Image (cartoon, grey):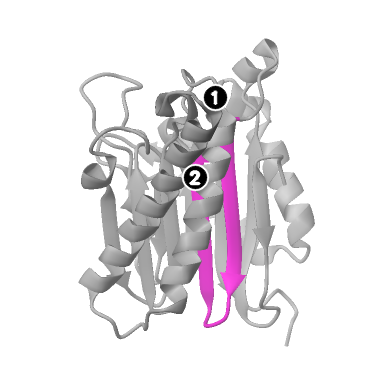
């Protein structure tokens, strides 16, 4: 996994199987800048996959720090919401819970800016949160990127999608005024089989815009790869190599983050 990724699996039987990677974009390599994406994930009892992806603003001097704080606090707050709720709770309760997780992440970033005596915009990032179990998917997003899921026989679909802005590269950040009010929130019920997160650096390659629907030719081989993987650590390394391959980097020079998850037993596990 890349230096922007942290993940842990707490359930070893039938559960979510995850490959995830964050890599520096070629523009950051040339400029000797760090990866400004932060990707976090973990599995939990009850068949839960929890994930957070923050993409630091290119104009922010502490973008990678702000993104790391947003993702770390976001997934902690998301876990707390999952632990205090039931699948039977109303959709509006789940929506309120995931917005509370966004708010907690925002508060942590604002507090960090105050401690460092800098403007909040210097730690600006987007933030996408995803919590998915076999019967429910809950997602929230401020800014660009996307959360995806599929419940066969339905095709893969975006739960959240890039915001539609008047100008290219214009987005809302977690630290922006009115960020929480602009957040996308989604609750869907289903027998979820695949789930994923991607950053804005991949959205022109992986999504059909402006409608924000996934390109099957991009995702089908990747989810098939995760379905077949027997060594998920090696799978994450291969995903990192894919993101750094010429077929990707010749089309985008941004930092790239991608999480792919499949629910079920590993190949060959009886």
**Element type at mark 1:** loop
The image shows residue 265, relative to residue 58, as above or below, that is: below
Residue 234, picture quadrant: bottom right
How crowded is the residue under tag 1: few (<14 C-alpha within 10 Å), some, or many (20+)? many
Residue 70 badge: 2
Q: Could you say where residue 176 lies in the image, as x and y percent from the top left?
A: 31, 32
Residue located at (57% from left, 81% from top): 45
Q: Characterize the magenta stretch by its predominant secondary structure.
A: strand
Residue indicated by mark 1: 254
The image shows residue 65, relative to residue 262, as above or below, that is: above
Specify whether 86 is left or right of 178: right
Magenta segment boundaries in residue numbering: 36-54
Is residue 110 among what the camera can see?
A: yes
Is residue 256 among what the camera can see?
A: no
Judge whether residue 45 is colored magenta. Answer: yes
Judge whether residue 72 is colored magenta. Answer: no
How crowded is the residue under tag 2: few (<14 C-alpha within 10 Å), some, or many (20+)? many
**Element type at mark 2:** helix
Compute the Cα span from label 2 to label 1: 19 Å
């Amino acid at each position: 996994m890349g230096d922007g990724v942290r993940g842990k699996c707490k359930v070893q039987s039938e559960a979510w199987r995850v490959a995830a990677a964050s890599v520096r974009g070629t523009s950051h390599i040339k400029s000797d800048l760090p990866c400004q994406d932060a990707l976090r994930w973990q599995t939990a009892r009850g068949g839960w996959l929890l994930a957070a992806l923050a993409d630091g603003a290119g104009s922010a001097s502490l973008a990678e720090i702000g993104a790391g704080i947003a993702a770390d606090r976001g997934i902690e707050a998301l876990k707390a919401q999952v632990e205090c709720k039931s699948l039977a709770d109303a959709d509006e309760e789940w929506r309120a819970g995931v917005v509370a997780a966004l708010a907690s992440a925002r508060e942590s970033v604002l507090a960090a800016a105050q401690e460092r005596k800098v403007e909040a915009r210097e730690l600006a990032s987007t933030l996408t949160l995803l919590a998915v179990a076999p019967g429910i998917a809950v997602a929230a997003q401020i800014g660009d990127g996307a959360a995806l899921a599929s419940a066969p026989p339905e095709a893969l679909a975006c739960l959240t999608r890039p915001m539609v802005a008047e100008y290219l590269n214009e987005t809302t950040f977690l630290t922006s005024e009115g960020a929480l009010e602009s957040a996308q929130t989604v609750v869907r019920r289903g027998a979820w089989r695949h789930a994923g997160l991607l950053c804005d650096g991949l959205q022109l390659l992986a999504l059909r815009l402006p409608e924000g629907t996934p390109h099957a030719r991009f995702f089908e081989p990747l989810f098939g790869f995760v379905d077949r993987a027997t060594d998920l650590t090696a799978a994450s390394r291969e995903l990192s190599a894919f993101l750094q391959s010429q077929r990707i980097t010749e089309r985008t020079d941004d930092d790239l983050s991608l999480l792919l998850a499949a629910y079920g037993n590993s190949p060959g596990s009886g």
